Image (cartoon, rainbow, N blue to C red):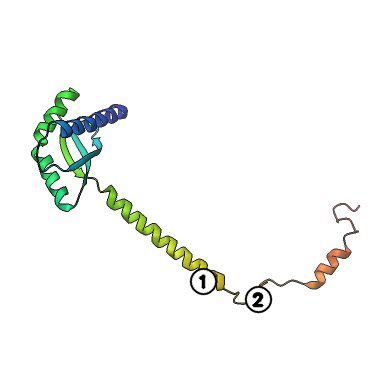
Amino acid sequence: MTDPAKVRRHAERIRELVASVVRSQIKDPRLGMITITDARITADLRDATVFYTVLGDAAAQASTAAALESANGMLRSTVGKALGLRHSPTLTFVLDDVQDQVKHIDDLLAQARHADAEVQRLAAKARYAGEAQPYRVDEDSDDLDSDDEDTPPASDRR
């Protein structure tokens, strides 16, 4: 079994190494404004997934993906040498669509706020379907309770 802390350390190191190599060594003009956001590695340290974001439209994302695929061999050898593992992990690059998810969640929250406001507006005008007090209240029992205040409860009597 591989230690989970060791796996996390290797994943963090892979993220740092890939970000450093992308920033300093890859000179591909297709590479856009890229940020390496996360890296995950399997427990056997054979496969690593690197998540990245790209500033720009779909064309910039596609060209950056192509640039990363073409530089995959160099990145893998650099990572393998730096980690000192017996086998260099294979690198898979995945576009991290955090911005799209954030926008989707913001839209859902705005819809929920609008729906809550609509419910509040309707509730302000609402009236009871029946009487305001739906339970039967015996007026005679209220009078009896007030008369019995001087009498101690049955448990106190002997």
Task: In the displayed orientation, state which residue is furthest to the top.
Answer: 84
Q: Is residue 122 above or below residue 21?
A: below
Dot 1, how many residues are within 10 Å of its Cα: few (below 14), some (14-19), or many (20+)? few
Image coordinates of residue 91 in percent, x first then y, are 16, 36
Residue shown at the point (37%, 58%) measured from the top left: 108
Q: Relative to the observer, which residue lies in front, 61 or 47?
A: 61
Q: Are marks 1 and 2 in contact (CB under 8 Å)?
A: no
Quick one: SS at disc 1? helix
Position above or below: 43 against 135: above
Question: Callout 2, which amino acid?
Answer: Glu
Query: Can you name the residue that lies furthest to the bottom here?
Result: 130
Name which quarter of the figure residue 14 lies in: top left
Q: Looking at the picture, how far across and down is residue 99, in whole percent?
A: 28, 49
The residue under the point 35% across, 58% down is 107
Residue assigned mark 1: 122
- Left or right: 146 in relation to 25: right
| The label number, if any, that marks residue 27 in the structure image | none
User: Which residue bears the numbered disc 2?
Assistant: 131
